[in-house]
Amino acid sequence: METSKRKKNILFITILSVVGLIGAMALQMIWIYNSYELIKNDILNEGYATIEKALEEEGNMRFGQTPKGTRIKSGPTNDTIPPMTYFYERLSDMGYPMSLHNLDSITAELLTLKGLGNQYYIDIINLRTGEKINGIGSQKEPSFMAIKPKYFPIRSDYTQVVQLIITNPNKTFLERMGLMLAGTFIIMLLVIVCISYQVRFISRFEKIFQIREDFSYAMIHDMKTPLTSIIMALNFLRSGKLDNRQEMKDKYFDIAENEADHLLTLTNKVLTISKLENHKLEMNKTEVELTNIIEKLTDK
């Protein structure tokens, strides 16, 4: 019953440790995912700010080509139409169209300064029809992790909007999450090692308990045999049946004496094992002659 209970406790601790490990890993994954989403939102905002800044600089370059004293009238704005939309629209209507090459070079420079990489694409889209009007950039094919900040209208009727697509932001994510990922990996590795060591230690502890039980059973059995022999020899000697048979009497005395020595040897072994467990005794290997040992065992 005691062994069964101990095994159940060990199984419970092992299951609890594994569940704890899975829970810790789940929490780490949730933390990493939330961090990823926060960084993704930051990149989205930075991407939008980048294309807005690039459009502003490209628009100022076009405005510098207009006659001195030119003024551009704005229009009604709302949450989706920023004031600069009318600026770009009026410039185009005045015969100063957007230069995609200038916008491309400005965007590339700003993205590099912000640490957003150099793999991007700029789309000019008719938002009403969904038709792609034009585009430029260093990489057209986006990865599955591509980030698309919200579009920026350059005409108030949404027939032309500009959208920056960061086609491969993996490097940016690694740069911003690298330290966190490395720390998470190290922590999880330590947790896994500690729990594995704990489970292994518990398993070895169970084996030690089992060995102790087997040893105790074997030792009791070994002690019972010489005790039985001693008692039987003493009973014969006490009965007086051997008083006239000195040779047989001496033989039974020898049996009792040998079994007593055997019992003393077993007792000394138990004490030796106790000393070994308490590190009070060192074991040294030596070679012994087996012939004498076998002959003694054969006689017994």
Image (cartoon, rainbow, N blue to C red):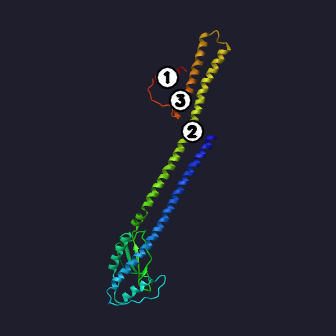
Task: Give the secondary structure at mark 1.
Answer: helix
Depth check, front residue: 182 or 280: 280
Q: Determine the residue positioned at 59% across, 21% down.
A: 260
Q: Farthest residue toward the front?
A: 69
Indicate the quadrant where residue 40 lies: bottom left
Query: Residue under circle 2?
Result: 209
Q: Nearer the viewer, mark 3 or mark 2?
A: 3
N-terminal of the two: label 3 or label 2?
2
Question: Callout 3: 10 Å neighbours few (<14), some, many (20+)?
Answer: some
Position of residue 137 in the picture relative to residue 15 (left or right): left
Q: Determine the residue positioned at 39% across, 78% down.
A: 53
Query: Residue under circle 1?
Result: 293
Q: Is residue 201 above or below residue 212?
A: below
Residue 106, percent from left and from top = 34, 76
N-terminal of the two: label 1 or label 2?
2
Q: Nearer the viewer, mark 1 or mark 2?
A: 2
Query: Can residue 119 be seen?
Result: no
Identify residue type, mark 1.
Answer: Ile
Q: Determine the residue positioned at 58% across, 16% down.
A: 254
Quarter placement of the N terminus: top right
Position of residue 178 in the picture relative to residue 66 (left or right): right
Q: Is residue 106 above or below residue 259?
A: below
Task: Give the secondary structure at mark 3.
Answer: helix
Task: Give the secondary structure at mark 2.
Answer: helix
Query: Can residue 204 be seen?
Result: yes
Residue 272 tag number: 3
Residue 58, percent from left and from top = 35, 81
Indicate the quadrant where residue 61 lies: bottom left
Identify residue type, mark 2.
Answer: Phe
N-terminal of the two: label 1 or label 3?
3
Residue 146, percent from left and from top = 42, 70
